[in-house]
Amino acid sequence: MKYILCRAFLISVFIFCLAVPAAAQQVKNYTFFEGTQYPLRVTWVFGDEPGPVIMVQGGIQGDELSGFFTAQLLTRCKVRKGSLIIVPRANEPSILRRTRQINVDLNRRFDKEYNSFYEDRLARAIRFLISGAEGFIHLHEGSGFYSPKYVNSLRNPKRYGQSLIIDAAVYKDIKLAEMSARAISKLNAQISNKSYWFSLFNTDTFAKATQYPEMLKSLTCYALHERGIPAMAVEVSKDIKDLGWKVHQQLRATVYLLREFGIELDVPEFTFPKSPSGKGFEILINGKPLRGKSIELVRGAPVSTSGKAVADSGLEPAVAVFASDRPNLNLLTAPRMALSQFPALEVRIDGSRQAKARVRWKGSKPDLPEVNGPVFLCWLNGQPRFISAGGTLEAVEGDQIILEGILGSSREEILNLKGFVASILLNSGQDVGHEIIADPANFMAKYMLEGQDGISRYRVVRETPGKKRSEFYLSIAPRTIKALELQGEDGDPDFVNWANGQHKLMRPDSYSLKDVWSNGDRCKIQAFVDNIPISWGETFSVRSGKETVLTMRHTTTFVPVGQMVFKGTDYLQTRLDQ
Ligand SMILES: [Zn+2]
């Protein structure tokens, strides 16, 4: 079982029963982009009493560790008033590589809609989450120490550490400076080392002469300017080595700001683990635990990996197994056939390398002659597909594809999907071993070969030096929904013909979302009721006289597939009225 499936138990609503029977706090966990290389795990904490909804996010840049630990610890808080949307790890691929960015800086993708990289899909979902919030706190870790005046190379206006960042002192009637200053005075009152005190950092983003024009592309600026909600960033310093201390202070800052926003909450005491990643995971490679310095693999055979938590650190880390030749393909969520040999496997937990095993290769076979041309091996939604030269790999919009190689060849083949850019850093044409999302809007239009019925086709060309050029096609059909299967409380199935954009009168009831009839895998569609994600089998209500909006989105791109509005109509009442 893939690690991601083990997480499925999290996708449920649990109720915490408290001593006072009337008070019940609800926590909902949900993963956007489930099963992709860029899962976005979100926790909603609904307080006992209604109040503002505030979003807190960490981990947008993978080398800023404090933010994702702080946000993760915040998911354990007790909210008395208001509710929280918490995104601890906004950019898991960058966290797994401990780098600021993989393709582009995700925190510079909010000035407009982009669609080039996975980062842009994440930005799409983050914008969606922000649209349900009335305030936003962004957790970062910057270098050095911010100071409005130049003190030295580590303490000056171009350093970001130990500051609360705002885009303006006052924006419309939002008093960002006042709110932040109050939080800072409470923070600093309990920090004895003055050189670690927090400062207010106003980037004056909207001023013509701003020193920080790049902030116009940031998420806090988007939240403030486009959504009109208060937003600030809490930066701790990369130049303070004690991670536990930084997380503690960042959490304090977050709590003070949340209180400024009108949230009432308590954060439980915690002891930050000395080594936060720990050895809490057991990784299995082909069913055997990965222990020691080497592992035996068979060339030409599948490499299956799975992992399970053996100790709970409370930090819900991002876990990955990487083969050394494919540094961005997490084998816990992507299949692999070892056609070509790679030297090592490594396990990373929140980006920290926990184990590295050299591969001892067994059963090297001679290369097979390609009598009738090469046979290409690809993965479509995790299933193997074998395609002869000139053949077609048939996909549906939003499917996941990985080009693996050529059967019987032990070389690292070069396969180029024309129109797709796997990596902005080295556009070598090599698309083997990258997760490719079948999204024509993401491919270069000039490479599209027209097909019938809205199907687009692309060429995948073998460009391995010294080998005869050969190719196959990838076709992408639009994803369509034909019908829904719902189940009312009486247990009888209700079939709804899908009519995108239409209103439908429905008997008021509680409906379970049983199934969808579409032209592809069901797991590639995620359902949202009134903009709250619901899983297959979960229930939603249609109330008399009220409208309930059901939106279906592509799991891999977050783009809507379609939407229907259910209007609760009491038929008996209608008849009497007439
Ligand atoms: Zn940052």
Image: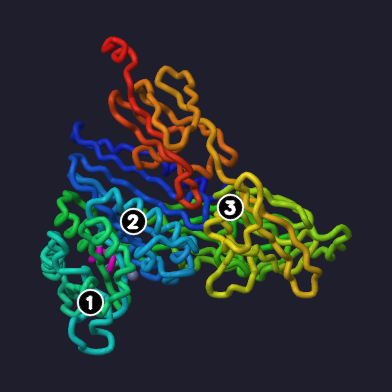
Q: Which residue is mark 1?
A: 208
Q: Please identify the quarter of the rendering in which residue 413 is found.
A: bottom right
Residue 189 visible in the snapshot: yes
Work out whether mark 2 precedes mark 3 in sequence or the reverse, and give the earlier one: 2
Mark 2 or mark 3, which is nearer to you? 3
Residue 313 in view in this figure: no
Q: Quadrant of residue 11?
A: top left
Identify the disc placed on residue 72: 2
Write the start and end of the magenta stretch as one range. 246-250
Eyeballing the image, is 460 above or below 485? Answer: below
* 383, 69: nearer the viewer: 383
Locate residue 353 relative to residue 68 in the image: left or right: right
Residue in the image at 27% along x and 65% along y? 221
Looking at the image, do the residues carrying marks 2 and 3 touch, with CB atoms under 8 Å apart? no
Q: Nearer the viewer, mark 3 or mark 1?
A: 1
Which residue shows up at 40% across the image and 66% down it? Answer: 106
Disc 2 to disc 1, C-alpha distance? 37 Å
Snapshot quadrant of residue 329: bottom right
Q: Magenta region, mostly helix, strand or loop?
A: helix
Q: Position of residue 389 (x, y in %)?
A: 78, 57
Quadrant location, the C terminus: top left
Query: Which amino acid does the dot numbered 1 rest on?
Result: Lys
Image position, residue 531 (x, y; %): 35, 42
Q: Please, what secondary structure does the residue beneath circle 1 have?
A: loop
**Residue under label 3:** 400
> Along the polypeptide, which appears first: circle 2 or circle 1?
2
Q: Quadrant of ligand 1?
A: bottom left
Q: Is residue 431 left or right of residue 176?
A: right
